[in-house]
Image (cartoon, rainbow, N blue to C red):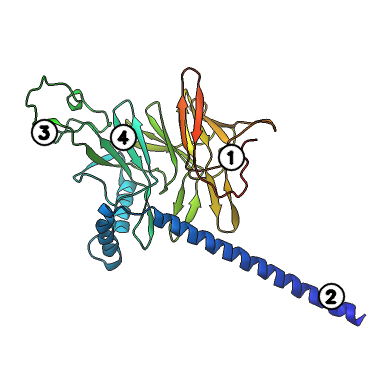
Amino acid sequence: MGKKDKKKTRDPEKKAALTAKKDAKADKAALKRLAREQDRLSSLSIHDDDREDAKAIASNSRNGGGEDIDSILESFRNRTKELTSAELEVIDTPFPSPPRGTFTWTLCPTNGLFYMFGGEFYDGAENLVFDDLLRWDPDYKESQSDDEGDDGNKTKENNLEPNNNQDEGNPKNFPTGQWTRILSPLPHPPPRCAHSAVFHNDGIYIFGGECATAEKYHHYRDLWRLDVKKNTWEECRSRGGNPPAARSGHRAVAWRHYMILFGGFHEALRTETRWFNDIHIFDFQTFTWAELQYGKLARLPPARSACNMGLCTAPTESLFIYGGYSKLKNPNLGG
């Protein structure tokens, strides 16, 4: 009896020790993932042309010399809280500052303008994730007057027209492009990068993405629509079906009155990273989601993120996927 009692008293101790060992192992794995993420952010690598600017921005941020990026972004957010309609601010530099990566760059075919949303910037010390909305007019000329309305549509005078070689060689006749920051009233999407964006019917639809900073690491599964005429946002709540799982690094295209979404990944501190090869379809007319289902013998592309995806409409309507990235050791190569 004495030995059995002694054995019983040891079991809870062994159980607690095993639990502590598992927790320590999980914490170690989480730290490794964080280290890999930091390496990934470092690999975004500011180009040599931008490195001096990045150092200056980082120095200002840390040493209090002038307005730092966080203060500027916070100022924009505070202003948007007070807005009742969108405001446009022309940026008088060739490119927005700071440099950034993993943003979305969407062409609006109805007005010929490009829209940039989100993205991230690593200054060597911390990672910043943006929620600002920028617009680029590739046809803008320095000599033209401000003939653009708040609805984002260019007037005819802003389009490039042949001038029968008049004033040929005058640099003012060539488009220089112009950046504009759009300050939209609430609501609008929170900061993110590695999301997707597609254009449909005067709207840009943003799905998913991630926010990876020193204070926060989060994947999104929300869907937002930017009205390019009013420059306002609205969150698109699903009226049926299940939205895709939270993810980033996925790809999306617009087809007819649908948005097709493929792939991506989801990473959390205490769970294994998940890589996706599922296909989800969002119906712009009914605001419903559906996931494509396949038989057991179907050949599917392996799970991945950051791939290329394109839609071909002739001779048949087909979706093509190339490349991408995953850390799966033994990926299913589609049979």
Which residue corresponds to the image point at 21% horizontal and 44% vertical from the top-left?
94
Q: Dot 2: what SS? A: helix
Rendered view: 131 above or below 289 = below
Where in the figure is residue 37, as x and y percent of width and height?
47, 57
User: For the residue marked with disc 1, what is the amino acid?
Assistant: Pro
Q: Quadrant of the N terminus?
A: bottom right
Dot 2: few (<14), some (14–19), or many (≥20) neighbours within 10 Å?
A: few
In the image, which disc is placed on residue 302? 1
> How far is mark 2 from mark 1, CA to CA?
49 Å
Of the residues under marks 4 and 3, which one precedes in the sequence? Answer: 4
> How far is mark 3 from mark 1, CA to CA?
51 Å
Q: Which residue is mark 3?
A: 172
**Residue extending farthest left:** 167
Of the residues under marks 3 and 1, which one precedes in the sequence? Answer: 3
88 and 315: which one is in front?
315
Q: Which residue is mark 4?
A: 114
Dot 3: few (<14), some (14–19), or many (≥20) neighbours within 10 Å?
A: few
User: For the residue marked with disc 3, what is the amino acid?
Assistant: Lys
Of the residues under marks 4 and 2, which one precedes in the sequence? Answer: 2
Of the residues under marks 4 and 1, which one precedes in the sequence? Answer: 4
Q: Dot 1: what SS? A: loop
Q: Which residue is mark 2?
A: 8
Residues at marks 3 and 1 touching, judged by CB atoms closer than 8 Å = no
**Residue extending farthest bottom:** 2
Q: Dot 3: what SS? A: helix
Which residue corresponds to the image point at 25% horizontal and 58% vertical from the top-left?
52
User: For the residue marked with disc 4, what is the amino acid?
Assistant: Phe
Dot 4: few (<14), some (14–19), or many (≥20) neighbours within 10 Å?
A: some
